Amino acid sequence: MNTSASLSAAFKPLRVIGLMSGTSMDGIDAAYMETDGEDIVRCEAAVTVPYDGAFRQRLAAFIKAAPDRGAASHEGAIETELTDLHAAAVFHLLKAMGVTPSAVDLIGFHGQTIWHRPARRATWQMGDGGRLADILGVPVAFDFRTADVAAGGQGAPLVPVYHAALARAQGLPTAILNIGGVANITWVGTAGELLAFDTGPGNGLINDWVESHNGQAMDKDGEMAAKGKADQALVARLLEHPFFSKHPPKSLDRFEFSTANFVGTHFAHFSPEDGAATLTAFTAAAVARALKHCPIKPQRLLVAGGGRHNPSLMREIERAVGIPVAPVDGLGWDGDALEAQAFAYLAVRCLRGLPLTFPTTTGTPMPLTGGRLVQPAAQTRSVQATSVQAKSA
């Protein structure tokens, strides 16, 4: 992860807001940090703004109908709405901090993943960076995955370089598991070596199962799974999927293991509780399988993302991996804001031309920078900002 000698070692830290909407489609995380793209000066406020149920349903329907860019109708309208919701999340965070957009130098905008097809060198994270910059009056870095995928990389995960910066103060080697709709792991070696890849399904399959049976967006507190019994024989068969024997780097589309094309064929006879328990065990077993790829097994597994709030899943992971499993919050990190913070960090690296991805994190042929930077068009800001602020008030 050596940086170019031509870049000033005294680069001034910037005030940045990172935005993340994950494959769980539950809402937007916004986090403020100050960083030079190498060292983390400080992390401050963070907020989560949930999608309302109606928008989440429209977004899910759009994703389901969009096997390829342009295949779904209403692309422009939903992208505008999505972008404006991200702008509203920024205003919400700024209000909580008691500052205006002028207190921010840069925005890191991940967007919403619609589909991810690295084998076809294609990926789609929806979000209009130019519109967001215009509304906020702040430069925006976005489209972080395209350059990596175009170069033959997996385009995911992108957070490992930030995990490595956080892990410098921890005992190494260490491993950080992020559980969103898809789960991914970062292993950091004693000399700062990085290995990262998607482990398999995260919250996604569990959420889909629960929503289809009781209309809830998730298995809150793991209660449904706790009442069921996992079918371990089925879990073993599910792990025969070729993804799990493939060596990293590797990544997944959110719907690679979907209820329709994978789970549905095996789970039709399960009660809601047994299905939730089995999917929870499957997610945990995939994590255990992933640890076998690490050069040295870590002494503990640190967990970020929404999945760490599911006690049934956390217990099952600890049982499966055979080492202590703990939320990252115990280190003073904000486990809900970690990915949003990462995109603030990556935005500064994009600005500086520093690498975002590496051969051992995405499989790109060389350390590779990425992202696009767009400046605001001042003349359009006032009307759009007033409209979004009014909606977010």
Image: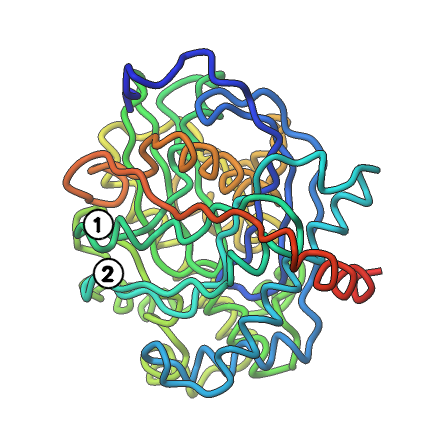
Q: Secondary structure at mark 2?
A: helix
Decide: marks 1, 2 in contact (CB < 8 A)? yes
Residue 50 screen position, x and y as percent: 69, 62
- Horizontal and vertical percent position of residue 371: 38, 46
Which residue shows up at 26% across the image and 62% down it? 239
10 Å crowding of disc 1: few (<14), some (14-19), many (20+): many
Above or below, comparing residue 344 to residue 115 in the picture: above
Q: Is residue 176 left or right of residue 14?
A: left
Mark sitting on residue 339: none
Q: Amino acid under label 1?
A: Gly
Give the residue at the far left of this rendering.
Answer: 365
The type of residue carrying mark 2 is: Pro
Quarter holding residue 268: bottom left
Give residue 161's position: percent from left, percent from top. 38, 33
Q: Which residue is mark 1?
A: 153
Q: Residue at x 57, y 75 (%)?
A: 210
Using the image as rendered, state which of residue 105 and residue 184 is in the foreground: 105
The image quarter in which residue 363 lies? top left
Query: Can residue 22 be seen in the rendering of this structure?
Result: yes
In the picture, measured across the screen, residue 29 lies left or right of residue 360, that is: right
| Label annotation for residue 118 | 2
